Image: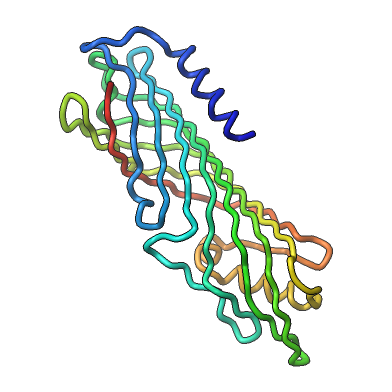
Amino acid sequence: MRYYILIMIFIFCQISFGQDNNQKNRANEIGLETIGIVDAQFMLTYERSFGKHWTGLIGYGRKAEKGLLNTSGIDRERLKTDGVGYDGHKLLIEGRYYIKEFVGMRSTGFYVGIYSKFSNYNSNLNGIYTSSDSEDFNFLLDTEVNVTSIGLMVGYKLPLSNRFAIDFLIAGPGTVNYKLSFQNKSEELPDEFYEDLNEALENYGIFDIINADFDFNPNKRESIFNSLSFRYAISFKFNF
C-alpha cells in the first residue's frame, strides 16, 4: 500500500509542477543520500523546482539488515540477546524555499523548509531470560518499529558543475513519534520479563539518548512515545 502512495505522489508532482524542460530550463534533480551507506541504508530523492524560489522533494529509502556497522545486543544480568539486525524502508516529503532566485529553474544556494518522514523497520529479537527464581526462558520476538517525524530544516546546495551539486542539510530540528510492537514467537514468558525488557530498552543505545519510556506488559505488546529529533544529511545531486 505504501508503495502505491509513493507512486501517486510522483504522479502528483509531475502534474502539479510539470512543464517542458530544455538546456536552459532544467527544473528536475535526482539525488542520493550518502551518510547511511555504511549501515546499509540509502535514499533516492527527486526534487522539482517551481516558481522562482520553491521546490518540492520526495524520497524513498531502504535499510538492509546487515551493513558495515554491527549493532550489539542487550547484555544485562538476566536478559541477554543476540546482535540486533533490522531492515525496512523510509519515505520522505519536503517543501523548500531557496533564498536565491532560480536561474534556469535550477535550485542552488541556501534554503529553508519543512519535512515529514516515515520509517518502518522489522527485526527479530532472539535471546535468553533468567527469571528471579533462576529459571531460563528462550525467547524470539518479532518486532516492528514505526517512526514518524516532522520538522523544520535549513541547508545549502553547492553546485559543482552545470549538472552536479552537493546538498548539505545542515540542521533539521523536529518532533518524532515512535510506535514499537512485537509478537512473541516462543514459549510464554513470566510477567517480570516485561519489566526487565522495558528497563533494558530504555537504557539501550539510541533509546537511552532520547529518554524513551516503554510500557510493555503481558497484556500490552505495543508502546508509543514522542521525542525531539534532529535530522541532517549529505546528498549528491544530478540536474536535468
Measured as percent of width and height from the top left, residue 92 is found at 49, 36
Left or right: 236 as drawn, with respect to 190: left
Question: Going by the picture, which residue comes out furthest to the left?
Answer: 161
Relative to residue 125, is residue 180 depicted above or below? above
Q: Where is residue 31 in the image (x, y as percent from the top left)?
A: 33, 34
If the image is split into quadrants, where does the N terminus sit? top right
The residue located at (51%, 19%) in the rendering is 11
Q: Is residue 12 left or right of residue 224?
A: left
Residue at 59% x, 29% y: name it.
Answer: 5
Q: In this view, does 8 lie above or below 231?
A: above
The answer to which of 105 and 72 lies nearer the viewer is 72
- Closest to the observer: 24 or 86? 86
Q: Say how the picture is coloured.
A: rainbow
Identify the residue at image location x=24%, y=13%. 104
147 lies above or below 213 = above
Quadrant of residue 201 in the image?
bottom right
Q: Nearer the viewer, residue 191 or 137?
A: 137
Counting labels gives: 0
Residue 186: percent from left, percent from top? 75, 71
Residue at the farthest top position = 20
Q: Please identify the residue farthest to the right as the structure is shown.
A: 219
- Residue 240 placement (x, y as % from top left): 28, 21
Would you identify the image quadrant in which residue 8 lies? top right
**Residue at the spot x=42%, y=11% of the render?**
18
